[in-house]
Image (cartoon, helix red, strand yellow):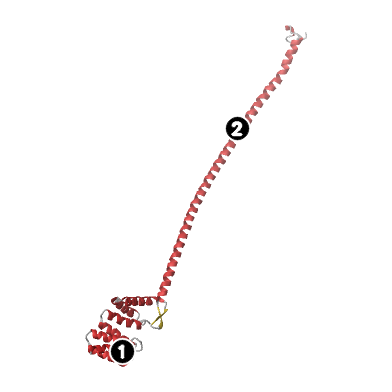
Amino acid sequence: MSATPVGWNTGWSPWAAAACLMVVLSAPAARAGLFDDDEARRAILDLRQKIEQSNEQARAAQAEQIAQLRASLADLSRQIDLMRTENASLRGQVEQMARDVGLMQVQMKDLKQGYDERLARIEPQKASVDGREFMADAEEIRQYEAAMAQVRSGDFAAAATSLAVFRSRYPSSGYGQSVLFWLGNAQYGKRSYAEAISSFRSFATSYPGDLRAPEALLAIANCQFELKDTKAARKTLDELFKTYPDSEAAQAGKARLASLK
């Protein structure tokens, strides 16, 4: 007895059997399609994960770069601030150096001026008095002129002091001859007759060839008359008449002597 396929005796038509057969045959293809979708979804998920990881890495790298850039900018800013501070310090030093140089220039100018003035006081200069020329330093000339100004003004006390100090300070001065004569006159002017006699006597003895020597002898006689020493005065006048008989001083002495008779 031959085997009969199951269902054939169930009353299915050949078309129903064919349909079942097609369903059975198409089942593997459907399973294959489902498998392909799962793989695609997993691939997409993996891709998304990789993209997220890549983005995260990129963001991390970018953040690190930004942090490094900020750190570099901060360091650059510090360096700029330091340079500004150093520049300000350098400017201050330069300005201070400029002030110091200016001060040194002023000091050098003052020192040079002081040196020139001291040198002028020490360095001899040509001077002249009573027709005689000689060398004298600036201070020597100044003191002589100051003393003579006192004589001309009639301040005989001050003049006598100044001329006496001059003789002590400059014993070998070219002004010495003139100073001694005017010292006697200043002493006579302030009525210091004994001192005047001493100065005039020294002048007449030291400089007998001076044109004022006769005047010095006449001044001595006048001082002696003021001191009531008539005998000494007559003796001095005799000396004047014998030594300088043709001088104006001798004529004045004769007139004075005649007035006493």
Residue 80 on image: x %, y %: 52, 49
Query: Does 220 sit above or below residue 100?
Result: below
State the quadrant of the C terminus: bottom left
Give the total of numbered labels: 2
Residue 202 on image: x %, y %: 31, 86
In screen coordinates, is 110 left or right of 193?
Answer: right
What residue appears at the point 64 percent right and 28 percent down from the top-left corner? 44
Q: Quadrant of residue 5?
A: top right
State the residue position of label 2.
52
What residue appears at the point 67 percent right and 24 percent down from the top-left corner? 37
Q: Earlier in the sequence, mark 2 or mark 1?
A: 2
Residue 112 on image: x %, y %: 44, 69
Q: Quadrant of residue 14?
A: top right
What residue appears at the point 29 percent right and 91 percent down from the top-left corner? 239
* Disc 1 secondary structure class: helix
The local crowd at label 1, few if under 14, some if 14 to 19, many if 20 or more residues have their Cα within 10 Å, is: some
Q: Which numbered dot is residue 251?
A: 1
* Disc 2 secondary structure class: helix
Q: Tell me, yes or no, if residue 201 can be seen here.
A: no
Q: Nearer the viewer, mark 2 or mark 1?
A: 1
State the quadrant of the N terminus: top right
Residue placed most toward the observer, 41 or 154: 154
In screen coordinates, is 72 left or right of 254?
Answer: right
Q: Quadrant of residue 56?
A: top right
